[in-house]
Image: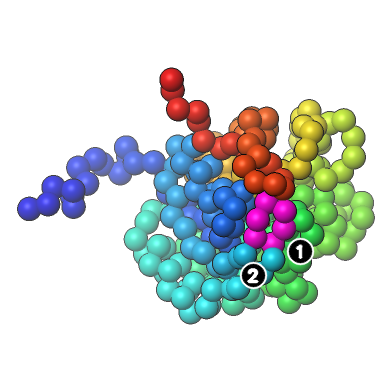
């Protein structure tokens, strides 16, 4: 008999399972790979559904091909059936149908908290969404979102507001419980990230602005929030620790290609 087949440890000893749904970035900077590294580094087990394949390097996305929606659905159903999911994280959605499937499954499994990282465009500028996809995120997913993590540009595009507070209020009215707006794309010596909550709560954090451009910082931050929430931390603490982890990964970033630097999400090997 194969002894590997029967897990001997009880569920209490298992790491929290986090479902990461998003695109594959072959450069290893963003997308599902960023999610897996982050979730594992912070003590979770990542299960993943790839919504889109891309051709990209560390400079920009050149092509995007959405995965067949029926195949996305089958993968999601298999994972929702098999695993005691605590949180799910959606990054690049790839298609309206994928958004519909995620929304349908979250309705069936209301205990799973969604972290929504509304990826609309690549750092290099390539558009990764269209108006229908943005509407689907707003109409179908925001009402089921526990924490949304737009950067200031994504907030502006989704809300139609140039003022951050007004934009945040607009998205909260759509039904999401918390909104972490990252200010990395704004000017200033410090990066200011703001947490708005539907109950009126507000917090902000200031981080030293690190030099250079990074590929996958948004994915890292959102995935860190997802795994820390899955570890049952209160939202403010999870968001604070997720930022600290991301800042550290950015400070240790590597530049293996010719373009943007990639956050170093995994711990160095002990020497
Ligand atoms: N997910 C995928 C698959 C991507 O290709 C990208 C950017 O190109 C992103 C997410 C967003 O990356 P970032 O975290 O830099 O916003």
* Magenta residue check for 58: yes
Question: Main structural element of the magenta stretch: helix, strand or loop?
Answer: loop
Q: How is the image coloured?
A: rainbow
Which labelled disc corresponds to residue 64?
2
Q: Which residue is mark 1?
A: 126
- N-term mark: 2 or 1: 2
In this rendering, the answer to whether 86 lies above or below 263 is below
**Residue 199: x %, y % from top left:** 73, 46
Q: Are marks 2 and 1 in contact (CB under 8 Å)?
A: yes
Question: Is the residue at mark 1 in contact range of ligand 1, meaning its CB lies under 8 Å from it?
Answer: yes
Regarding residue 26, the answer to whether it shows in the image is: yes
Q: In this view of the protein, which residue sits in the foreground, 134 or 4?
A: 4
| 120 sits left or right of 31 in the view | right
User: What residue is shown at x 54% (from left), y 73% (from top)?
Assistant: 67
Q: In this view of the protein, which residue sits in the foreground, 250 or 220?
A: 250
- Which residues fall within the magenta stretch? 56-61
């Amino acid at each position: 008999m194969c002894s590997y087949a029967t897990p001997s440890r009880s569920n209490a000893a298992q790491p929290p399972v986090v479902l990461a749904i998003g695109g594959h970035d072959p450069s290893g900077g963003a997308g599902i790979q960023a999610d897996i590294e982050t979730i594992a580094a912070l003590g979770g087990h990542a299960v993943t559904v790839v919504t889109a394949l891309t051709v990209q390097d560390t400079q920009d996305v050149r092509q995007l091909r959405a995965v067949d929606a029926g195949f996305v659905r089958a993968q999601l159903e298999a994972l929702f059936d098999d695993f005691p999911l605590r949180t799910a994280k959606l990054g690049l959605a790839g298609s309206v149908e994928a958004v519909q499937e995620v929304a349908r499954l979250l309705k069936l499994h209301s205990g799973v908290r969604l972290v929504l990282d509304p990826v609309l465009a690549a750092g290099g500028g390539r558009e990764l969404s269209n108006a229908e996809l943005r509407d689907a995120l707003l109409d179908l997913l925001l009402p089921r979102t526990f924490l949304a993590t737009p950067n200031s540009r994504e907030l502006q595009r989704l809300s139609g507001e140039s003022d951050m507070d007004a934009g945040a209020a607009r998205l909260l009215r759509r039904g999401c419980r918390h909104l972490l707006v990252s200010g990395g794309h704004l000017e200033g010596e410090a990066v200011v990230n703001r947490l708005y909550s539907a109950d009126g709560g507000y917090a902000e954090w200031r981080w030293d602005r690190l030099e250079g451009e990074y590929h996958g910082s948004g994915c890292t931050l959102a995935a860190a929030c997802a795994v820390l929430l899955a570890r049952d931390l209160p939202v403010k603490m999870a968001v604070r620790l997720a930022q600290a982890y991301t800042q550290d990964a950015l400070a240790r970033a590597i530049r293996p290609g010719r373009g943007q630097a990639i956050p170093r999400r995994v711990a160095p090997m002990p020497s």
